[in-house]
Image: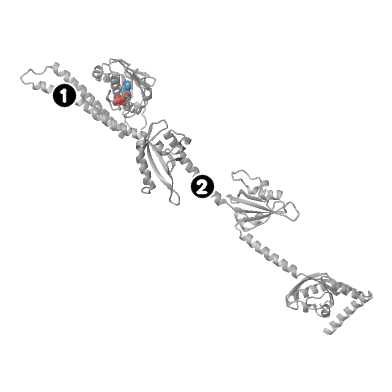
């Protein structure tokens, strides 16, 4: 077979040579062409024997290749691929190609891309033309490129930043895993999606819609300019919002002004936004607490200069914010209270105490002092150095007032209770002396009665005082109770006036009464008596020596009682105050009393669903009007 095959190959070579010879010297020409071609050109028999060769393969000179099998020169790893390529061409008659590695003399391997074409004779493949192009370098470059691309690909895949490649139309071509994670979409879902796609539901930081044409990638595609740190909120498919900060970079071909693609890179700032939002909310909450607090809150430097104050603090001291920042706490502190203040601050600064509280007075802008409870604490820097004081000031004017009033009340009470007792004692002692008069006649009724009347009046006053004290202890312990029953107010008024006749006489107050013969309603007679008694005793006390008019009338479903005197009167500024507990508009030196009578009147009237009011001017007498519903209508406790 080998001998036969060889002779067949020789025959083919000879035939080829003959053909060339017919071309007249063309063999030489052909060899020259083959040799000068940049690729190595071989003519093979269908079995792979080299019949003609041009430029040498790296292994041998062209002459030494002749009559050798092409497969001898091909490295084993590509030999079979080459053989099957040649066989395919022989079988099909169609050109084909393969890659052959040919090991050189010094062991280096050259890579060839072999294109095999059939040369037909008589309808069958007689010989084959194999053109081998050296692709060693190209393949090496391709491999290097592939490696470099792989490196970049793995760097991009490993990046925490989302990377998206968009083509000239803005459609997404590729993305990395971080982009999928941040946007909550797979790369398949993103592929082809444009920045203008409404499904992004992109928004600006203020919540307004983000116009897709202004997306940084689109701007870069339109202008060729990179964009930096554009903040955008996009809705993830699950609904929650992802906040991203986007940069975009154009991809430009040499000589072209506009990019053929754009790379958008972005990082997830959702967490940052969330903490910013949380911080903003907490600041808002703090600011609201600071501004709306019912107590004054201020920050003062270590030297005492006001740095920041809430509205309430400014109200408390009567200065505006601007005025306060020009002042120090020392300047607004009531001078006698300053030493204690400074001592407290010293203890805080030295670390002896964390906070210090003190009751002191500030001086308001107008000059009047205002009582405050001040609590001071110190904020320090991380280094421990003092930063500023936090001052909380609570207005305690009312409490101080109550304390003062209580003190005043105790003074008045002890005086008031003692005052009638001394004359009672004196009169009783005088009576005893009369009866013990040795040898003399017993005292006459004319001698005894005035003294007993005086004692009765004094005891009556004491009785009223004790009643008032009992009332106050009852009312302050629980809301005033009422037990309504059918009462004829006219009759009750007449009885009470009768009981007070002596009192009014002593006060030289002629009384006129204007009342219907009967006025029925549902009232508590005890409370009615308290109301009338207190109003009458005030009229005689503050309007002594002048007439007092008492009037009672029905007005619809109400009964109206007025007691009018012509005494010292009450200034308008005091009209509201005198109905409060312990509040008096006169001094105890002139008129005795606890400041409880009108308070009891109001409590009793309101407990029966009614009300009391005063009309008066200083020096012009006073008219007190009590209105009470006739039907049972209790104030809820
Ligand atoms: P008190 O008479 O014991 O002081 P009240 O509660 O009855 O207590 O009255 C409160 C204050 O109202 C009195 O101290 C007085 O200043 C004023 N007042 C009450 N009634 C009259 C009146 N008829 N005329 C003038 N002032 C009055």
Q: Secondary structure at mark 2?
A: helix
Q: Is residue 107 left or right of residue 582?
A: right
The residue sitting at 68% across, 63% down in the picture is 149
Give the x, y percent position of residue 194.
68, 51
Q: Is residue 598 left or right of residue 221?
A: left
Give the x, y percent position of residue 205.
59, 45
Quick check: is the Cβ at mark 1 less than 8 Å away from ligand 1?
no
Q: Is residue 110 left or right of residue 511?
A: right
Query: What residue sits right under mark 1 in the picture?
Result: 426
Q: Quadrant of the N terminus?
A: bottom right
Tag of residue 279: 2
Residue 485 appears in the picture as rendered: no
Given residues 516 and 455, the one toward you in this image is 455
Q: Quadrant of ligand 1?
A: top left
Given residues 265 and 61, the one toward you in this image is 61
| Dot 2 crowding, Cα within 10 Å, few <14, some 14–19, many 20+ | few
Can you name the residue that lies furthest to the left here? 439
Give the x, y percent position of residue 231.
61, 48
Given residues 126 and 61, the one toward you in this image is 61
Q: Quadrant of the C terminus?
A: top left
The residue sitting at 18% across, 26% down in the picture is 422
Q: Is residue 266 left or right of residue 543?
A: right
Q: Write down the quadrant of residue 512 in the picture.
A: top left
Q: Secondary structure at mark 1?
A: helix
Residue 471 appears in the picture as rendered: yes
């Amino acid at each position: 077979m080998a001998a036969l095959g060889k002779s067949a190959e020789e025959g083919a070579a000879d035939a080829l040579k003959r053909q060339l010879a017919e071309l007249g010297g063309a063999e030489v020409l052909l060899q020259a062409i083959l040799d000068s071609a940049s690729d190595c050109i071989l003519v093979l028999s269908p079995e792979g024997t080299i019949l003609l060769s041009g430029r040498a393969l790296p292994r041998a000179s062209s002459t030494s290749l002749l009559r050798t099998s092409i497969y001898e020169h091909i490295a084993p790893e590509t030999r079979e691929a080459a053989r099957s390529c040649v066989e395919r061409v022989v079988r099909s008659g169609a050109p084909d190609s393969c890659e052959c590695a040919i090991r050189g003399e010094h062991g280096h391997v050259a890579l060839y891309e072999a294109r095999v074409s059939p040369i037909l004779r008589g309808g069958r493949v007689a010989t084959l033309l194999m053109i081998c192009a050296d692709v060693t370098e190209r393949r090496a470059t391709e491999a290097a490129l592939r490696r470099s691309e792989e490196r970049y690909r793995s760097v991009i895949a490993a990046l925490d930043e989302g990377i998206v490649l968009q083509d000239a139309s803005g459609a997404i071509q590729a993305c990395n895993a971080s982009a999928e994670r941040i946007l909550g979409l797979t790369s398949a879902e993103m592929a082809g999606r444009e920045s203008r796609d409404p499904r992004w539901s992109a928004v600006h930081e203020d919540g307004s819609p983000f116009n897709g044409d202004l997306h940084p990638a689109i701007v870069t595609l339109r202008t060729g300019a990179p964009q930096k740190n554009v903040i955008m909120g996009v809705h993830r498919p699950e609904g929650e919002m992802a906040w991203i900060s986007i940069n975009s970079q154009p991809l430009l071909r040499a000589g072209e002004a506009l990019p053929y693609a754009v790379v958008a890179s972005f990082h997830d700032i959702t967490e940052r936004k969330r903490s910013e939002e949380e911080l903003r909310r907490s600041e808002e909450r703090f600011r609201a607490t600071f501004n709306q607090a019912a107590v004054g809150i201020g920050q003062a430097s270590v030297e005492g200069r006001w740095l920041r104050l809430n509205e309430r603090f400014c109200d408390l001291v009567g200065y505006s914010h601007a005025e306060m920042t020009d002042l120090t706490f020392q300047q607004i502190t009531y001078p006698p209270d300053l030493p204690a203040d400074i001592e407290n601050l010293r203890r805080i600064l030295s670390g002896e105490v964390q906070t210090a509280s003190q009751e002191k007075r500030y001086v308001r802008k107008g000059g009047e002092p205002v009582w405050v409870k001040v609590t001071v604490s110190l904020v320090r820097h991380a280094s421990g150095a003092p930063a500023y004081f936090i001052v909380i000031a609570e207005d305690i004017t009312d409490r101080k007032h109550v304390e003062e009033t209580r003190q005043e009340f105790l003074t008045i009470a002890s005086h008031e209770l003692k005052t009638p007792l001394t004359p009672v004692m004196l009169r009783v002692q005088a009576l005893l002396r009369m009866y013990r008069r040795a040898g003399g006649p017993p005292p006459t009724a004319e001698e005894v009665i005035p003294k007993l009347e005086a004692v009765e009046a004094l005891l009556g006053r004491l009785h009223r005082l004790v009643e008032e004290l009992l009332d106050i202890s009852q009312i302050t312990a629980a809301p005033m109770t009422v037990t309504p029953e059918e009462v004829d107010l006219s009759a009750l008024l007449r009885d009470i006036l009768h009981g007070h006749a002596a009192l009014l006489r002593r006060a030289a107050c002629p009384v006129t009464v204007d009342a219907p013969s009967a006025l029925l309603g549902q009232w508590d007679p005890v409370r009615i008596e308290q109301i009338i008694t207190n109003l009458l005793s005030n009229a005689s006390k503050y309007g002594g020596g002048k007439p007092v008019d008492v009037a009672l009338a029905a007005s619809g479903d109400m009964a109206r009682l007025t007691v009018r005197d012509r005494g010292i009167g009450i200034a308008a500024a005091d009209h509201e105050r005198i109905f409060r507990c312990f509040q008096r508009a006169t001094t105890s030196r002139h008129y005795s009393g606890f400041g409880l009578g009108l308070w009891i009147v109001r409590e009793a009237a309101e407990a029966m669903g009614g009300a009391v009011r005063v009309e008066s001017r200083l020096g012009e007498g006073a008219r007190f009007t009590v209105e009470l519903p006739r039907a049972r209508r209790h104030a809820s406790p």
